Image (spheres, helix red, strand yellow):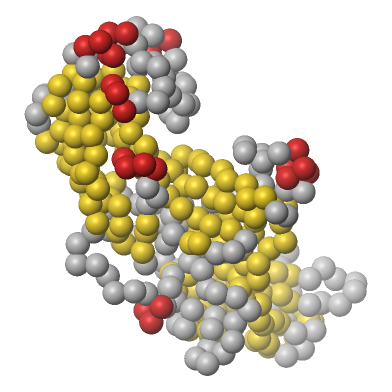
Amino acid sequence: MSTKIVLKLFRSNRIYRPSEPVEGKIVINSPSSISHHGIRLSVTGSVSLQVRGGSAGVIESFYGVVKPITIVNKSIEVKPPGKIGSGTTELPFTMVLKQIGEKSLGRFYETFHGTDVSIQYLFTVDIARGYLYKSLSATTEVIVESDKADVLERPVSPEMAIFYITQDTQRHPLLPEIKSGGFRATGRISTLCSLLDPISGELTVETSAVPISSIDIHLLRVESVLVGEKIVTETSLIQTTQIADGDVCRNLTLPIYVILPRLLTCPSVFAGPFSIEFKVSIVISFQSELSKLHKKSDPRTPRLWVSISLNFIVEETYLFAS
C-alpha cells in the first residue's frame, strides 16, 4: 500500500474571494513512517491562453500557446523537515490569496473555463523526500469570485433589449414556404445581469405560416486572444435551453429563463491580451421534411428551416456582472 495525500477544504463549494482565508487540512495516509524535507502549500493563479484554430491562421495555430498571465504565486511552509508517522496524519492550514495592502502580480479575474481562455486558481501541497524517493503532491482547484469592494453596485433592474424576428431579418437562405408565408416573433430579453441571476425575458410568436418545431436559446461565449499583432476570436456554444417544443399558440407570451453555468461563465472581461464576452441567440426551428435528414447538425450553423436572431440588436454583446 502506497502513501496517499489528499487536500481537503473546509468550504464544500470551494468558492472564495481573494481577501477571504482559505482553510482546510492536508490528510496523509501512510502504511509506515516516512521522512521528509518539509511540507509546503502553494497557490498559483493564472490566465492560460491558447489558440485552437477556428479563425486562427496557419502561423497563429503554429504558435498556439501564448505565455500565461500570472495572477498570484505564493507558498507557505506547513511543516518543517522531519518524520510523518504511520496511519492517518492531518495537518490544518490557512492561507489568504491576497492580503490587505499586498500587491498582486495581476488583477484577480474570476474563475473561468473556456476554450481558448482559462482562469484557474490551484492549491498544491508538496512533500519533498529527497533524491531517492518520489515527492508526494496533491492539487485542488478553488473558485474565485470578485471581492465585494471591487464589485459595482448591482443594478435595480437588468437592462432589457427589444427584438423582433421575421423572414426579412435573416442573413441566410430560408425554405420557400417559410419566406413566402412569412413569420414574425417579438419579445424582450435582459442584456445586463448578475451571474447569480438568470437571463430573463419573454417571446411571442405573432404569425407563422409554417408550423414551429422548437424555440431554443443558445448561450455563446466569444473569446479573443492577442497573438502577435493579430487578435484571434473564437465563438463556441456553452449551452442550449429550450423554451418551446412543438408548434406554439400564436400571440401567446412565452417566458425566457436561462440559468447560467458558473464555471463556464464569468463577468465580461476586456483586458489587453485577451477578452471574454457572451452572446445569446434565439433559434426558431420549423417543421420540415428536410430537417429530419439533419438531426445532428451544428446548432450554430444557419439552415433553411431555421430562423436565427443573434444578439437581437446589431450584434450587441452580453454583459455579466459579479
Q: Residue at x 78, y 81 (%)?
A: 36
Quarter of the rendering containing residue 175: top left
Instruction: Give the side of residue 214 with respect to residue 77, left or right.
Output: left
Query: How far across and down, in percent of the image, does residue 272 sit?
Result: 59, 64
Q: Return the residue nearer the eye: 9 or 234.
A: 234
Query: How far across and down, in percent of the image, does residue 178 sit?
Result: 27, 13
Which residue ends up furthest to the left in the rendered image? 251
Instruction: Give the side of residue 72 with respect to residue 145, left or right.
Output: right
Query: How far across and down, in percent of the image, does residue 177 sit?
Result: 27, 8
Residue 255 sits above or below residue 81 on the image? above
Q: Residue at x 44, y 15 (%)?
A: 294
Which residue ends up furthest to the bottom in the rendered image? 101
**Is there any visible trace of residue 50 in the rendered image?**
no
Residue 227 sits above or below residue 47 on the image? above
* Quadrant including the N terminus: bottom right
Instruction: Give the side of residue 15 with respect to residue 167, left or right.
Output: right
Q: Residue at x 24, y 48 (%)?
A: 161
**Is there any visible trace of residue 96 in the rendered image?**
yes
Q: Return the residue nearer the eye: 233 or 47.
A: 233
Quarter of the rendering containing residue 267: bottom left
Quarter of the rendering containing residue 291: top left
